[in-house]
């Protein structure tokens, strides 16, 4: 066992076991039934819940027609359990099994998903919730919501979409035209293109809006929302009309509570928020930003609502939005003040010939990365030279965003808007080979990934 993993463990550590069967089969989205790939037959897959400091033992069985892995998005875990083919393990062959076993150090809202090809954009995902044994839990109920864009099992599957994007070369928009005659998808909030792929459905917890999940509660109750964007190519703007959200965490880590009418989540980002339920039922709406669709969960307090999903979406769209880049970490989780030992620039570029997306003009090569050494304070400068936003994710660490006024939130995924630069810092305290990449699954697969590579 890795020395580092031994240090994470403690006497009396509990082990939580999860059986995860990656399989194909029919999925009912609440009307449309599609043939897709899932964990255990349902979308989302099983929720895994444990306490900070526990050991997770997850037995993956691969009954998919392709090799697969599981990545534990946001968790500072041992490198060999990170689920990245070539870099940290051989992909698990079709028909084979693999045991993931690691200590989960930090509380928060996380996700698990495959890290092979475009599998993320099928139905393979689940929430990983890590409770904080020291938190007082000042709320009555909890609601975990995974927002997703969906095309698997409809006209084209994600592999075909990527092939079309590549075949259509530099213009992803031509690929879209072939997929259903959409026009340009643009968003002021995202500062440019809203996506490369048009989707027939948007889902909240696996359901289309017309057949939304109902969450039963009482007027006046405080609900902790754990909002997760697990989409392939869609940012979601999320809110409840007339009900302010108080953001308490992003990407698992606490922030100074910040209230507002809605939040923006890029792919791979999470936010926890507290709401107080009003006297009548309302929808919790996730607007597919710039794409003209929405998903929802019905918050039902017994008294019916007159608010339609369209009215709710219009109301939320007219209000200000909280971006994760504006949040500030609590002192307890803020990185101590320190000058960086190393600064790496990541110039985000594309799309080039054949729909290639790059970092520092290079497509992904697992053998080449950004060199760091254990003990260093590392600064990454993410510079977006493209016309689309990129939610940039780092494995194995939670960085701190630098803002104009100082330090921002601790996060593992940060939106970098077109023409903008975002700086983040982390302490190199988890040796290994760690992917950093755009969490748009098509951009990542088309090359927008590199490796933060510890050298000893
Ligand atoms: Cu959630 Cu490398 O990804
Ligand atoms: Cu991207």
Image: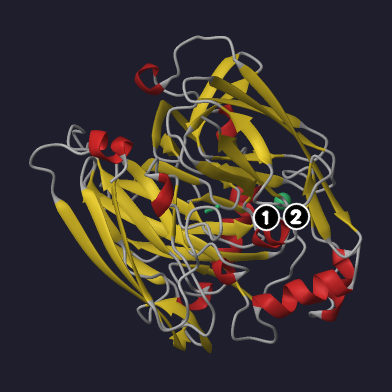
Seen at 34% across and 42% down, the residue is 108
On the question of residue 176 being in view, the answer is no
User: Counting other residues with Cα less than 10 Å from the Cα at mark 2, is it few (<14), some (14-19), or many (20 or more)?
Assistant: many
Pointer 1 with pointer 2, Cβ within 8 A:
yes
Dot 2 beta carbon under 8 Å from ligand 2:
no
- Residue 217 higher or lower than 102, as above or below: below
Residue at x-position 51% and y-position 44%: 395
Splitting the image into 4 quarters, where does residue 144 fall?
A: bottom left
Of 132 and 368, nearer the camera is 368
Which color scheme is applied? secondary structure
Query: Which one is earlier in the sequence, the residue at label 1 or at label 2?
Result: 2
* Foreground of the two, 84 or 257: 84
Q: Which residue is mark 1?
A: 289
Q: Give the quadrant of residue 424.
A: top right
What kind of element bears circle 1? Answer: loop
The residue to which callout 2 is attached is 194
The image shows residue 91 at horizontal and vertical percentages of 50, 68
Q: Indicate left or right for 38 with 393 as reference.
A: left
> 136 or 447, which lies in front?
447
Residue 31 image position (x, y, % from top left): 49, 87
Choose between 193 and 120: the one closer to the eye: 120
Q: Is residue 154 above or below residue 430?
A: below
Secondary structure under the numbered disc 2 in the rendered image: loop
Asked whether, in this view, residue 441 is left or right of residue 388, the answer is: left
User: Does residue 401 appear in the picture of this structure?
Assistant: yes
Question: Could you say where residue 228 lies in the image, as x and y percent from the top left?
Answer: 47, 53
């Amino acid at each position: 066992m890795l020395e580092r993993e031994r240090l994470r463990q403690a006497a009396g550590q509990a082990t939580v076991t999860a059986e995860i069967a990656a399989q194909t089969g029919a999925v009912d989205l609440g009307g449309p039934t599609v043939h897709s790939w899932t964990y255990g037959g349902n979308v989302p897959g099983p929720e895994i819940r444990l306490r900070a400091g526990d050991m997770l033992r997850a037995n993956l069985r691969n009954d998919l027609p392709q090799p697969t892995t599981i990545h534990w998005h946001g968790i500072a875990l041992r490198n060999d359990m990170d689920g990245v083919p070539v870099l940290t393990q051989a992909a698990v062959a079709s028909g084979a099994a693999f045991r993931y076993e690691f200590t989960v150090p930090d509380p928060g809202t996380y996700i698990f998903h495959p890290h092979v090809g475009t599998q993320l954009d099928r139905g393979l995902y689940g929430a990983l919730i890590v409770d904080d044994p020291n938190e007082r839990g000042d709320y009555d109920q909890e609601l975990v919501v995974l927002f997703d864009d969906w095309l698997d099992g409809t006209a084209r599957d994600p592999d075909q979409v990527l092939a079309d994007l590549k075949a259509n070369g530099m213009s992803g928009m031509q690929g879209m035209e072939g997929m259903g005659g959409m026009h340009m998808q643009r968003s002021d909030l995202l500062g440019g293109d809203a996506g490369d792929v048009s989707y027939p459905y948007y889902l909240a917890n696996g359901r289309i809006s017309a057949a939304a999940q109902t969450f039963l509660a009482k007027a006046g109750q405080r609900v902790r929302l754990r909002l997760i964007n697990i989409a392939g190519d869609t940012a979601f703007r999320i809110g409840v009309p007339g009900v302010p959200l108080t953001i308490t965490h992003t990407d698992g880590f606490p922030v100074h509570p910040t209230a507002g009418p809605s939040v923006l989540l890029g792919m791979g980002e999470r936010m926890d928020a507290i709401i107080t339920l009003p006297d009548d039922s309302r929808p919790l709406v996730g607007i597919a930003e710039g794409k003209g669709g929405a998903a929802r969960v019905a918050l039902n307090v017994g008294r019916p609502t007159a608010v339609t999903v369209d009215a709710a979406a219009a109301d939320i769209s007219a209000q200000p939005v909280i971006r994760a880049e504006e949040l500030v970490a609590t002192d307890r989780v803020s990185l101590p003040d320190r000058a960086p030992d190393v600064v790496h620039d990541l110039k985000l570029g594309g799309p080039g010939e054949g729909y290639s997306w790059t970092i520092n003009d290079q497509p992904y090569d697992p053998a080449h990365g950004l060199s760091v050494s254990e003990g260093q304070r590392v600064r990454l400068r993410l510079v977006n030279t493209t016309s689309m936003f990129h939610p940039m994710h780092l494995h194995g660490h939670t960085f701190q965003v630098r803002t104009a006024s100082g330090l921002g939130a601790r996060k593992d995924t940060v939106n970098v808007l077109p023409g903008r630069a975002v700086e983040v810092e982390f302490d190199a305290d988890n040796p290994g080979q760690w992917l950093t990449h755009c969490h748009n699954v098509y951009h990542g697969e088309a090359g927008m990934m590199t490796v933060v590579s510890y050298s000893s």
